[in-house]
Image (cartoon, coloured by chain):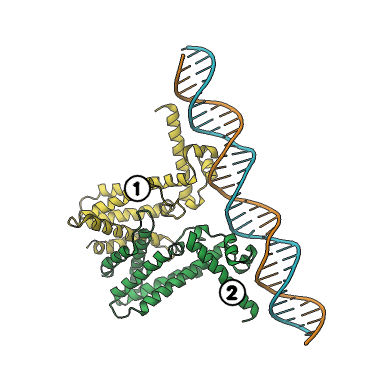
Chain colours: A green, B yellow, C cyan, D orange
Amino acid sequence: MGVREEANERRRNDILDAAERIVAEKGIGHLNIRDVARASGCSVGTIYTHFADLDGLALHVNARTLARLAAALDDVERHDQGGDIAGQLCAMAGAYMDFAAGNYHVWSALFEHRMPQPLPEWHREDHFRLFRRIAGKLRTLHPNLPDDEAFLRARTLYAAIHGIVSLGMADRLGRLPAETLKAEIRRIMPNLLS
Amino acid sequence: MGVREEANERRRNDILDAAERIVAEKGIGHLNIRDVARASGCSVGTIYTHFADLDGLALHVNARTLARLAAALDDVERHDQGGDIAGQLCAMAGAYMDFAAGNYHVWSALFEHRMPQPLPEWHREDHFRLFRRIAGKLRTLHPNLPDDEAFLRARTLYAAIHGIVSLGMADRLGRLPAETLKAEIRRIMPNLLS
DNA sequence: TGTACATCAGTGAACGCGCGTTCACTGATGTAC
DNA sequence: TGTACATCAGTGAACGCGCGTTCACTGATGTAC
């Protein structure tokens, strides 16, 4: 990789770092080009040599978040291969919960309505990759189920967990501590798998 | 009520009607004062004699949505008193699903991050009122549970349903038909209640 | 009933700001010979 | 190795637009006498 290519990659990462920091602090609704430029130490024009536009930048921030989330689930899976599937799924749901709690703004940016509609295919694929990790685990529980049936059940499980995390941390009904929510997930997980 | 008071109320309703129509068509992210003024046949200044600001208007649109949603659940409850609790909760969850599917933009506005933070107390109470309807139904299933325990279980149920509706209709993992989602809710409801 | 005044909703031009995006220009890096 | 040219990232002022909000003014409705 030439000097220029390296510099480009470094710059691109700096920009993404800055954007991510801003989203983490204030939410994706406050992401704007000027602040990113200032925080990453370049001019506004430079942002546009590395990203098509603000939406493109936001999408790449989200892509990073999904990658970090996937890595967090990887960790759990590595350290938790002994127990039964239900226990492993609980642990993964717990990790999801912890990630959302510890990275609230970047996590909720993943589901924000102000993202470009429709989402570009590559980014939907990022979401799907994360989902397939859960689906695959669940698949081993129901080896005889047809694929589409198993897929649907996995989605329902994923969505239920998502709802518990999402509503638990939004302020619509008051926030609940992550530990409380994780306990609830542990309580209902066996029922969701039967 | 004097002529002036009546006219005020009519105007206020016209404004809310227009705002609701705009949100229903384009989402709350596209709500703006000028369009509301045009659609309700008054000037921009008039909006401010009836609402404090754009956020206030948006909050009242959401309050209306919650009221309509509550009315939809009322209907279900009235026509569905025969069966068991699980059946009734399924029917209510189905009505929630249908409402969200048939009023997607106004429904999702309820959970949007761009609402003023923190939410005003009166509007959080609107959310709570809706939630308590589910909680009350569930309460009769577990009469011996302590109140806080029953409350938590109701929230988990509510949140799980919410997640299934929410992720099912967002495009992150592809949209699913409302009927499919309702079938999934029927499938897991008994498990969630045990 | 009539008159004078007060109150208050409605008006829309204007203000001001935030912000995405562009573009002519600069200077550094790469390339051809 | 040196020279001339091409390529390309960086710069930041400027453009243009959307949009929330204000305000001096108008005219209708209510009120006091």
Q: Which residue is mark 1?
A: B125
Task: Residue B135: give x, y in percent of width and height.
Answer: 26, 53
Name the quarter where the C terminus of chain A is drawn.
bottom left
Helix, strand or loop status at disc 1 = helix
List the single residue furthest toward the left: B144
Kind of residue indicated by mark 1: Glu
Task: Residue A91: give x, y in percent of width and height.
Answer: 33, 72
Q: Which residue is mark 2?
A: A10
Name the quarter where the N terminus of chain A is drawn.
bottom right
- Does residue D15 lie above or below A66 as drawn? above
The answer to whether residue B42 shows anywhere in this view is no
Quadrant housing residue A168: bottom left
Task: Residue A139: give x, y in percent of width and height.
Answer: 33, 75
Q: Nearer the viewer, residue B120 or B187?
A: B120
Residue A190 tag number: none
The residue at 28%/53% (across/down) is B134
The answer to whether residue A178 shows anywhere in this view is yes
Residue A179 is left or right of residue B16, and the answer is left
Residue B119 is left or right of residue C2, and the answer is left
The residue at 45%/55% (across/down) is B113
Provide the chain ID for the residue under circle 2: A
Q: How far is mark 2 from mark 1, CA to CA?
A: 49 Å
Task: Residue D6: give x, y in percent of width and height.
Answer: 75, 75
Helix, strand or loop status at disc 2 = helix
Quadrant housing residue A130: bottom left
